[in-house]
Image (cartoon, rainbow, N blue to C red):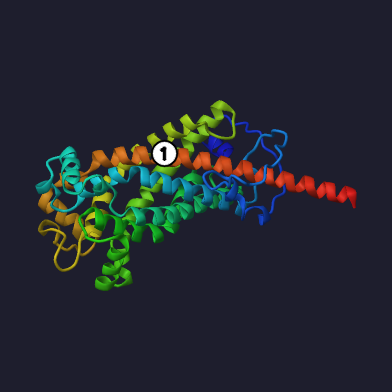
Amino acid sequence: MEARVSSSLGLPSPKPHEISISTTLSDFPSLLTHFPPFASTTSVKWPRPNPKPQSIKSLPLLDRALIGAAAGGLAGAFTYVCLLPLDTIKTKMQTKGAAQIYKNTLDAVVKTFQSSGLLGFYSGISAVIVGSTASSAVYFGTCEFGKSFLGKLENFPAVLIPPTAGAMGNVASSAIMVPKELITQRMQAGAKGRSWQVLVEILKNDGVMGLYAGYSATLLRNLPAGVLSYSSFEYLKAAVLQKTEKNHLEPVQSVLCGALAGAISASLTTPLDVVKTRLMTQVRGEGVNKVAAVMYDGVSSTVKQILKEEGWVGLTRGMGPRVLHSACFSALGYFAFETARLGILREYLRRKELSERETQVSDSTA
């Protein structure tokens, strides 16, 4: 796919060295047991095969999607937990009435620490771990599936493969991401109790559909943000691979490409994120605090209310923390994803080659 993107952007085609293998899904289920931190200290010491160039593009479509999902789940959990404090401050800054509560970002950090200590920056962490692992696995698995599938369509414009795959991943993962973000942001905004207690309270007051408050705003934000971030990263990745003539990014390259892609995406989509946050942090009945108790009916009414009360500046609330968070998130996320995927891929290919050797030995001795 990188070769087609490079060509469509007017770049010389990269020259990754690939191997052609015929793979099946039979080797995949126990694969993660050999990937840190899940590797057992008593696991079998597999003989190291002769070094060969490796590429995920040589795998069947479904195998590629499953490896992407596994790597995405690991990367998602790692990244969300690392950056939860920044996300907490961003949410506090975007909640209705934040201008009357916090003078600036530093004031929000200080007041959060004074009221709740370090744990105040990790409100809703259990929902984050469970939700981010699942949503990231679905997201990256779908993106990898989309890239592989679309890359096989000769008439599909190569330059449109990354944005289309990113859109597919966002639509699929939002079904899991929205309830996770809803619970997390309710707790960040001041809701009392543990994650499961907040979940029960939402179901009690608003039913199952209450878990999807702000769903349309989330899609409105995630689709352009996902397309911008994922596309930017894939285009940058294609350019780097063309320059280095390798089939994978080095860690520093993943970090830099991810940070730039995340910053671009976040700066352009902050207004959508503000609207989504307002819809998610509203509560029925008595609010978390008086300034956050006003109800919004939908995306359009929320935008009108923000413009009426706060002007255009209201739609840029939390932009600084959001851009910083997104740049760090994308840098860590893409670094973790590329690293995890490469590790899983190498183990997958090693196990496959070992299996083929054992088959050849058994056939020769038969």
What residue does disc 1 label? 332
Would residue 333 be found to the left or right of residue 60 on screen?
left
Residue at x 43%, y 55% (from the top left corner): 135
Residue 207 sits above or below residue 186 on the image = below
Q: Secondary structure at mark 1?
A: helix
Residue at x 13%, y 52% (from the top left corner): 97
Q: Is residue 208 visible?
A: yes
Q: Position of residue 198 (x, y in %)?
A: 27, 64
Looking at the rendered structure, the kind of residue marked 1 is Leu
Residue 232 sits above or below residue 144 on the image = above
Residue 210 sits above or below residue 241 on the image = below
Q: Position of residue 215 (x, y in %)?
A: 32, 61
Residue at x 49%, y 32% (from the top left corner): 251
Residue 7 sits above or below residue 190 on the image = above
Q: Residue furthest front?
A: 42
Quarter occupied by the N terminus: top right
Residue at x 59%, y 30% (from the top left corner): 246
Quarter of the rendering containing residue 82: top left
Q: Position of residue 271 (x, y in %)?
A: 25, 48
Q: Position of residue 72 (x, y in %)?
A: 48, 48
Total residue callouts: 1
Q: Is residue 155 visible?
A: no
Crowd band around label 1 with a 10 angstrom C-alpha radius: few (<14), some (14–19), many (20+)? many
